[in-house]
Image: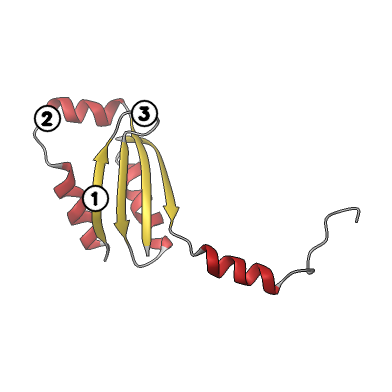
Amino acid sequence: MKFIVLGNYNENGLSGFIKNPNEDRKSVITSMMEKAGGKLDNLFLTRGKYDIVAICDAPDFETMGALKMLIMNSGAISKMDILEESDFNNMASKASSMMGAYKAPGT
């Protein structure tokens, strides 16, 4: 499954960069993903709302949830959102088959 991870470093994470500006974070994250049975496709450090954008593959959402627990526990990240790739055509097909099964309150 494909996932997009959005995150923000906090003061501890940024302090780590300043202490070791040449550390290869992509290598660290690649190793972590491989240990979890996944793969890091790409990692971007960005300006704007998020400091980190990672594109990765993992066996399931639970694996990504476990990685989030691990990363957030490090104290270097203040926020981490995980977006899961979805098949909109499949969703629409399921919604179509359920048409009429739901009525809004008061109708």
Mark 3 and mark 2 in contact (Cβ < 8 Å)?
A: no
Q: Look at 32% across and 49% down and name the residue there.
A: 70
Label pair 1/2, CB-CB below 8 angstroms: no
Task: Report the residue at 40% width, 30% height from top.
Answer: 49
Q: Check disc 1 and report its element: helix, strand or loop.
A: strand
Q: Which residue is mark 1?
A: 42
Residue at the right extreme of this rendering: 106
Query: Residue 28: where, in percent of width, then height?
Result: 17, 48
Q: Look at label 2 and name its amino acid.
A: Pro
Q: Residues within 10 Å of mark 1 (few under 14, many from 20)?
A: few
Q: Which residue is denoted by mark 2 in the rendering?
A: 21
Q: Nearer the viewer, residue 97 or 22?
A: 97
Q: Give the percent coordinates (x, y) of residue 26.
A: 17, 46
Position of residue 65 in the picture relative to residue 56 (left or right): right
Label 1 vs label 2: CA separation?
A: 20 Å
Q: Residue furthest left?
A: 22
- Helix, strand or loop status at disc 3: loop
User: Nearer the N terminus, badge 3 or badge 1?
Assistant: 1
Closer to viewer: mark 1 or mark 2: 1
